[in-house]
Image (cartoon, coloured by chain):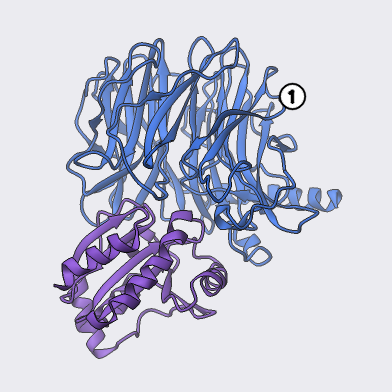
């Protein structure tokens, strides 16, 4: 996993965001594994909170506002919240964007492209068990520090990030 | 409108005869189609049915929409009448094209019965006429001519007028999905599904609803609530009948604290009443999320065997357990594949000699299909065996017991459905090509 991630960091230095033909619909970009790796590589130096969610996942929808608040509260620590929708990719980006705009305006989220979702998430977690929500706290060095599963509170997310930031 | 639908159906049915020529060894679904979420069943005549959800390219243009709202998928079955050596051309089951809502975690199901009838249940997308909004409803159909044709599907669930699209996942007005079906030896056919009609902003669990046929699927009872809203709303139900026509149902019961516990309950053959909540043997898993994990089971004589994904164990993954007292209690579960990075999506079947558990797991780069056998006493009888070829990701296996006591396994790989035969006894399994 790390080797792939580091390779992507190197690749991104030459072609940041030049990942495989993303489909753009209403500002939600679909990413494949290389695309996700490039997105994360571009954030090296920041603490990234990567949140796997889906439009059909009620607990996901409950916790996203807390994640947004957490990001705002910890702005001075260079924390970046990135969503990744694992919704069925075919024709879904407009619906994802609509829900995002209605319920979580400003939430930066990507969506999975066609293909195996396990392969996509394996960029950060080869042992993902396909549960949503799953949230990863990725350190400034690009390594995954914490995996959090299930809906959590603002306090729990804040504590998890501060444990990495300090 | 009905005439138009008949023409479309006839045209698509004719088209499938071409597909069979395109299949290759080990695969059943046609090339150039995306086939997902397979199921497999065997009837009393020994015929083997492989069912799958087909994302047909012919439909993609007119149904380019999200499959949570308006599906673009169909349901197909292929039958083998020679013990799995060959499969006939696939037959399309749903009459209205593109209405099937199904994927690996909420897959349509098929069972065969003693009379040779094939029974199928699936969730379908409908647009509520009064509201113009999508709803998921539960459908049933059967074939009494060896799967050459299927009756017009019947809706088993009630399409209510309550608009709960603001609180139901995915924006449906209401949802009846995550279904299962059992055909009992006495001719009863029982369909169970997860129903959201009682959901509210403060109640995000689902109820278990059922409809029962006492005449081999010719007619069904009104759908009734079998269990109050305590079921994890994204974990598919699984059911199996025992020799006495009692039916066992596996699901995840949501206890206080968001403990989503794999649970098995017995439906009495005579009264139709549901028995007490019985823990299926795995450690409590606290998860305020969407596990998407079924509780699978198989029965033989007075034993019930089960396999589940458990996130509550020290090593999360697929766990096996068993009951030797008719499902009143289950042994502490054991890991099937503790060495895997992750294991998930179990299926289970039993014959006169052994139990086979199948699942997908990742030991290296991609998920592959594995099996392990257990004796009827619940003790492991063999090690972990790889079934798929490792060439690409292989997922979502389902295994069924054949009439000769061997097992038929199906799974999804490269957008196609694969199958193999598992033979042998007492933990000595050989893997055949079909």
Residue shown at the point (23%, 24%) measured from the top left = B428
The answer to which of B412 and B181 lies nearer the viewer is: B181
Residue B193: in sight, yes or no?
Answer: yes
Residue shown at the point (18%, 76%) measured from the top left = A140
The answer to which of B87 and B377 lies nearer the viewer is: B377
Q: Residue furthest bottom?
A: A14
Left or right: B310 in relation to B42: left
Q: What element carries label 1?
A: loop
Colour chain A appears in: purple
Residue at which label 1 appears: B219
Q: The blue chain is which one?
A: B
Q: Is residue B31 above or below residue B281?
A: below
Left or right: B416 in relation to B325: right
x and y, in percent, of residue B131 in the image: 76, 57
How packed is label 1: few (under 14 Cα within 10 Å), some, or many (20 or more)? few
Q: Is residue B268 above or below residue A117?
A: above
Residue B401: in sight, yes or no?
Answer: no
Residue shown at the point (41%, 31%) measured from the top left = B296
Residue shown at the point (38%, 15%) measured from the top left = B328
x and y, in percent, of residue A51 in the image: 35, 65
């Amino acid at each position: 996993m790390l080797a792939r991630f580091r390779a992507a960091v190197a690749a991104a230095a030459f072609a940041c965001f030049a990942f495989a033909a993303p489909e753009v619909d209403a500002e939600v970009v679909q990413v494949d594994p290389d695309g996700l790796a490039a997105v994360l590589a571009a954030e090296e130096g920041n603490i990234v909170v990567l949140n796997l969610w889906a439009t059909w996942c009620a607990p996901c929808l409950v916790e996203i506002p807390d994640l947004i608040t957490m990001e705002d509260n910890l702005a001075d620590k260079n924390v970046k919240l990135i969503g990744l929708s694992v919704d069925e990719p075919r024709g879904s980006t407009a619906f994802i964007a609509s829900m995002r705009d209605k319920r979580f305006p400003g939430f930066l989220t990507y969506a999975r492209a066609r293909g195996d979702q396990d392969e996509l998430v394996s960029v950060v977690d080869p042992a993902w068990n396909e549960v949503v929500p799953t949230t990863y706290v990725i350190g400034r060095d690009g390594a995954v520090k914490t995996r959090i599963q299930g809906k959590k509170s603002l306090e729990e997310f804040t504590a998890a990030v501060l444990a990495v930031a300090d | 409108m009905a005439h138009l639908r008949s023409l479309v159906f006839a045209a698509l049915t004719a088209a499938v005869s071409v597909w069979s020529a395109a299949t290759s060894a080990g695969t059943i679904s046609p090339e150039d189609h995306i086939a997902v979420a397979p199921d497999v069943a065997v009837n009393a005549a020994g015929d083997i049915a492989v069912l799958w959800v087909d994302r047909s390219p012919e439909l993609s243009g007119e149904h380019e929409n999200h499959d949570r709202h308006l599906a673009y998928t169909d349901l197909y079955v292929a039958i083998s009448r020679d013990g799995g050596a060959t499969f006939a051309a696939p037959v399309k089951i749903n009459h209205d094209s593109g209405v099937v809502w199904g994927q690996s975690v909420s897959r349509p199901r098929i069972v065969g019965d003693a009379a040779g009838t094939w029974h199928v249940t699936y969730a379908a997308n409908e647009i509520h006429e009064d509201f113009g909004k999508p709803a998921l409803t539960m459908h049933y159909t059967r074939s009494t001519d060896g799967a050459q044709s299927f009756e017009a599907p019947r809706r088993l669930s009630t399409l209510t007028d309550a608009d709960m699209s603001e609180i139901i996942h995915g924006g449906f007005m209401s949802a009846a999905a995550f279904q299962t079906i059992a055909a009992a030896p006495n001719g009863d056919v029982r369909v169970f599904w997860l129903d959201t009609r009682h959901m509210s902003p403060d109640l995000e669990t689902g109820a278990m609803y059922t409809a029962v046929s006492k005449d081999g699927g010719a007619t069904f009872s009104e759908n009734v609530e079998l269990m109050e809203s305590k079921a994890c709303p994204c974990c598919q139900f699984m059911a199996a009948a025992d020799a006495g026509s009692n039916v066992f149902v596996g699901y995840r019961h949501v206890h206080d604290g968001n403990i989503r516990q794999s649970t098995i309950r017995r439906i009495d053959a005579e009264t139709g009443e549901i028995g007490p909540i019985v823990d299926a043997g795995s450690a409590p898993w606290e998860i305020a999320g969407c596990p998407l994990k079924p509780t699978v089971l198989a029965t033989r004589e007075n034993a019930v065997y089960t396999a589940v994904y458990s996130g509550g164990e020290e090593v999360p993954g697929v766990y096996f357990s068993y009951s030797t007292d008719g499902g009143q209690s289950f042994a502490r579960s054991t890991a099937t594949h503790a060495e895997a990075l992750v294991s998930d999506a179990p299926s289970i079947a039993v014959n006169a000699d052994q139990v086979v558990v199948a699942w997908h797991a990742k030991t290296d780069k991609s998920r592959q299909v594995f099996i392990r056998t257990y004796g009827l006493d619940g003790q492991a009888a063999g090690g972990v065996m790889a079934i798929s070829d490792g060439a690409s990701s292989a997922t979502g296996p389902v295994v069924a017991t054949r009439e000769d006591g061997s097992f038929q396994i199906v799974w999804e790989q490269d957008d196609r459905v694969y199958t193999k035969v598992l033979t042998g006894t007492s933990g000595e399994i050989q893997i055949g090509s079909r």
